[in-house]
Amino acid sequence: MNIDSIHNGFVIDHIPAGRGMKLYELLGLDALDCSIALIKNVPSKKMGKKDIIKIDADISLNLDLIGFFAPDVTVNIIRDGVLVEKKSIALPEYLTGVIRCKNPRCITSCEQELAHKFKLTDAENHVYRCIYCETKASTEQ
Amino acid sequence: MKSLIDILDFSVEEVNALLDTADDIIANPDKYAECCKRKKLATLFFEPSTRTRLSFEAAMIELGGSVIGFSDAQNTSSSKGESVSDTAKVISCYADIIAMRHPKEGAPLVAAQAASIPVINAGDGGHNHPTQTLADLLTIRREKGSLENFTIGFCGDLKFGRTVHSLINALARYEGVRVVLISPDELKLPSYVKTDVLDRKGISYTQTTDLEAVMPELDVLYMTRVQKERFFNEEDYLRLKDSYILTPQKLTAAKKDLCILHPLPRVNEISVAIDDDPRACYFKQVLCAKYVRMALILKLLKEAGKIV
Ligand SMILES: [Zn+2]
């Protein structure tokens, strides 16, 4: 793929088509002032269609969030215009501070500054459960 | 620091060893009478549960230890807004081990993460109650001789009954356990327990609404309370609460060595007429609960290096 435009930054590739915009929002990319490209519905041999996000800035990306929301994406790391690393993002074992537990009976609903933490309990079906109350996480949030 | 928050925190080997200790305590109580001398158990009951609290307190006293604590959050600093985590840190300075009951799910885990002493989950809302499960396992093992190769029927509220989910989780780790689920349609076992536990572990199970029809198959019958607070309206509760009441007449087709369990308190799920039947094991279960809590306190204090 074409990475000409990126000097130091990332190309998040193989995002399932239609999820790019949501991932863009979740990663808080709208708050950055560097150049960012969100490319939708790119033809892909493997996936039919895919979305791609290019970020021309060396920011710290929340890989857990990417792994949870769009598993099987590839994060290409570009330094001085050269592709230095191709990271396949697997499902993270734990998600800390990424998503919130929505169970009102859960201790996370009232304990001061307690991070919401989820554990991968079923990798096959991408199921995450709150470590405190075992409520299933929803990808919809 | 080893704590007990979820029954699955312990391996099968650990559970078996704990039950062995409990058996030994029952056989030789004097041997254990001073094991926890000068040690303190803190019972932190953020919601009242007199039965469970007294069981823990009796357990610690029979080990020669003493007890501090509270049984009502109204009079504690948590009513002033103190976090569970801070409470656990403070109590760690006073006591050697904590038994915590809390209405919020996961509160004992938060306490265990903050405390410098072992924490026992004595019930967190509708979530876990691992010492009840240990008591159930001990009773079944003492009555049946083993935790393998038997058929257990769960009857009543299988939807909200946390004791049922937890016992199924624990039994799924033993060989040859068959499960019969007996409940009204409204209170069926949640499908995630079936897929995540029963199906995954290859446990054979059947589902029915008819207690009498399956009675002859059962080696163990686990009755549960249909709790009023689980219903959104009074009408549903009143319609369902009497659906699954155990009477002497329903027991006519049961095995001679059936073991009847109930986590108690009962409302009316088991007729009082059954109490004198040798198959009624629910009061033995209460006794087992105390002994298994003794074994648990010993295990955790030993592993924490507090006793030898
Ligand atoms: Zn939760």
Image (spheres, coloured by chain):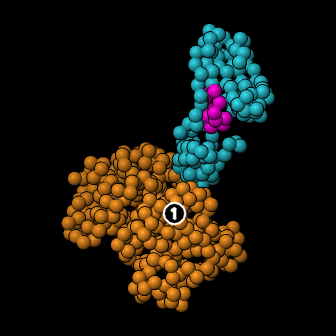
Chain colours: A cyan, B orange
Name the quadrant containing residue A74: top right
Seen in the image, is B204 located left or right of residue B287?
Answer: right
Label 1: which residue? B203
Judge whether residue B289 is colored magenta: no
Name the quadrant containing residue B105: bottom right
Pick the residue in front: B84 or B16.
B16
Q: Residue at x 49, y 84 (%)?
A: B254
Q: Residue at x 49, y 72 (%)?
A: B152
Q: Residue at x 60, y 55 (%)?
A: A105
What chain does badge 1 belong to?
B
Looking at the image, residue A30 lies above or below residue B149: above
For this orientation, the residue located farthest to the front is: A45
Looking at the image, residue B216 lies above or below residue A9: below
Pick the residue in front: B256 or B159.
B256
Where are the magenta residues, as a range?
Answer: A58-74
Residue B17 in sight from this viewpoint: yes
Q: In the rendering, at what x and y percent does residue A41 appear?
A: 79, 29
For this orientation, the residue located farthest to the left is: B31
